């Protein structure tokens, strides 16, 4: 005796048959087929809800019942994240039926707002979103309606900006990108600073974004004070690319934190001084210095660098000056050194943020820019579900290096 097929199997069989008949030719046809099931499904669920409310099915009315079906309400269009569907809500004589699957007066199903916000987070204009919803999802919604949906994000943004942070971050990375923002009738590029932290469990998190006209010690003091007010008590290592006013402000607010210049940025500064034909070779020689296993080897590599590139006095002088930023690295275990010697972690974040800011023209206000960046950051955060590489090893090394200063924050 053959087993009766499930509903899923029947749907799949029908789709396969449509494929054989040439009705389904592409993935979009498959999506259209599945989307076409939503309207009838919702209608059947509404009918089932009324059955449950009346406590008998459509053709099983009992004499004891004091309520009955009373036709349907006027057909209505309901917007979903898949497009528009048409449904008719069934009625009962007593008017006591209140459906839950699609409530009375409801014309949008959950998920539609998320679609608007998701498109906005990817840097699309309101006009782009309006067009996409109309062309792809057959949903007509005005820019004003989209604006209302997106403005609902404001409260979430404010909560995120003021949320409590962890008391300790072993590693924090700072970097900035520049974005044009309208100031009256003039568009000006403003610096957007991003701080990426790694917490005591090895997980990445964006601690905040701050917008300012230029880099300054006062600005950075305010940023670090903001971190303190939100609960940060200690930072072990802070890596940046030599931002103006950064180091002095850090020392005033978090006096014990070790500040580290990003060596990749140092390499870029060396590259700018190089003749084009020799640039690759010179930068490689510089990399040989900062990737040395210890200080003695680094000094030997520096000696070779000076001999090999002696004719480039400015470059040699620059590399010698940069040794002050490299020396502290060689006092650390290789695993920690690899984490702090570059700010690539936060630069990759900024690269993702630029995808939603570049080519969009000037933002009308700092608030609108902050909203777009927040939504993008929220998407990125969902991908950080695991600790950074070698965290167990790094954690043990931090315990050995910092003792009680670090361990008092650990759950051990």
Image (tube, helix red, strand yellow):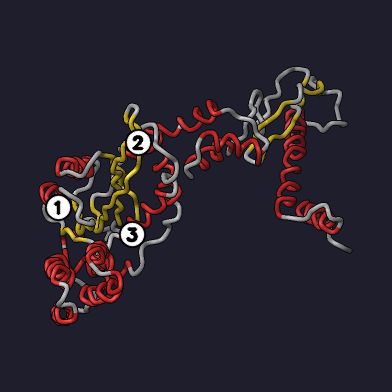
Estimate the x, y position of residue 41 in percent, counting from the top left.
75, 40
Assign a secondary structure to mark 3: helix
122 left or right of 136 in image: left
**Quarter that holds the C terminus:** bottom left
Q: Nearer the viewer, mark 3 or mark 2?
A: 2
Assign a secondary structure to mark 2: strand
Assign a secondary structure to mark 1: helix
Which residue is found at the position 75% from the left and 42% from the top? 36
- Measured Cα–Cα span from mark 2 to mark 1: 27 Å
**Residue matched to label 1:** 247
Which residue is found at the position 48% from the left and 45% from the top? 122
**Residue matched to label 3:** 345
How many residues crowd around disc 1 within 10 Å: few (fewer than 14), some, or many (20 or more)?
Answer: many
Q: Residue furthest top?
A: 94
Which residue is found at the position 35% from the left and 39% from the top? 180
Q: Nearer the viewer, mark 2 or mark 1?
A: 2
Question: Which badge, 1 or 3, is on the more N-terminal residue?
Answer: 1
Q: In the displayed structure, would residue 203 be above or below residue 299? A: above
80 left or right of 155 in image: right
Q: Is residue 3 in view?
A: yes
Question: Which badge, 2 or 1, is on the more N-terminal residue?
Answer: 2
357 left or right of 80 in image: left
**Quarter that holds the N terminus:** bottom right
Q: Is residue 408 in view?
A: no
Q: Which mark is residue 328?
A: none
- Measured Cα–Cα span from mark 3 to mark 2: 26 Å
The quarter of the picture where residue 398 lies is bottom left
**Residue matched to label 2:** 181
Estimate the x, y position of residue 5 in percent, counting from the top left.
82, 56
Q: How many marks?
A: 3
Q: In the displayed structure, would residue 378 be above or below residue 150? A: below
Estimate the x, y position of residue 90 in percent, counting from the top left.
77, 26
């Amino acid at each position: 005796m053959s087993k009766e097929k499930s509903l899923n199997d029947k749907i799949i069989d029908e789709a396969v048959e449509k494929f054989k008949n040439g009705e389904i030719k592409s993935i979009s046809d498959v999506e259209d087929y599945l989307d076409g099931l939503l309207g009838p499904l919702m209608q059947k669920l509404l009918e089932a809800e009324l059955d449950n409310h009346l406590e008998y099915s459509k053709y099983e009315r009992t004499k004891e019942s004091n309520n009955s079906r009373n036709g349907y309400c006027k057909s209505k269009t309901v917007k979903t994240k898949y497009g528009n569907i048409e449904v008719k809500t069934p009625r009962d004589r007593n008017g006591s039926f209140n459906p839950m699957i699609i409530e009375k007066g409801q014309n949008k199903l959950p998920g539609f707002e998320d679609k608007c916000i998701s498109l906005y987070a990817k840097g699309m204009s309101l006009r782009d979103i309006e067009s996409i919803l109309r062309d792809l999802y057959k949903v007509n919604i005005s820019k004003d309606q989209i604006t209302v949906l997106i403005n609902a994000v404001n409260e979430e943004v404010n909560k995120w900006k003021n949320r409590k942070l962890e008391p300790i971050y072993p590693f924090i990375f700072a970097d900035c990108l520049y974005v044009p923002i309208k100031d009256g009738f003039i568009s000006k590029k403003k610096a957007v600073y991003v701080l990426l932290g790694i917490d005591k469990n090895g997980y990445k998190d964006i601690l905040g974004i701050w917008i300012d006209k230029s880099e300054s010690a006062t600005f950075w003091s305010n940023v670090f004070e903001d971190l303190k007010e939100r609960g940060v008590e200690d930072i072990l290592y802070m890596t940046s690319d030599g931002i103006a006013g950064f180091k002095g402000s850090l020392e005033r607010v978090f006096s014990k934190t070790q500040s580290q210049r990003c060596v990749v940025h140092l390499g870029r500064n060396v590259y700018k001084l190089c003749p084009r034909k020799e640039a690759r070779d010179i930068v490689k020689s510089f990399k040989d210095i900062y990737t040395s296993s210890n200080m003695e080897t680094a000094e030997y590599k520096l000696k070779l660098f000076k001999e090999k590139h002696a004719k480039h006095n400015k470059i040699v002088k620059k590399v010698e000056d940069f040794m002050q930023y490299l020396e502290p690295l060689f006092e650390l275990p290789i695993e920690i050194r690899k984490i702090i010697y570059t700010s690539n972690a936060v630069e990759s974040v900024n690269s993702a943020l630029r995808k939603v800011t570049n080519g969009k023209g000037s933002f009308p206000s700092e608030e609108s820019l902050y909203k777009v960046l927040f939504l993008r950051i929220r998407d990125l955060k969902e991908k950080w579900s695991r600790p950074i590489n070698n965290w167990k090893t790094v954690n043990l090394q931090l315990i050995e290096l910092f003792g009680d200063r670090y361990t008092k924050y650990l759950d051990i």
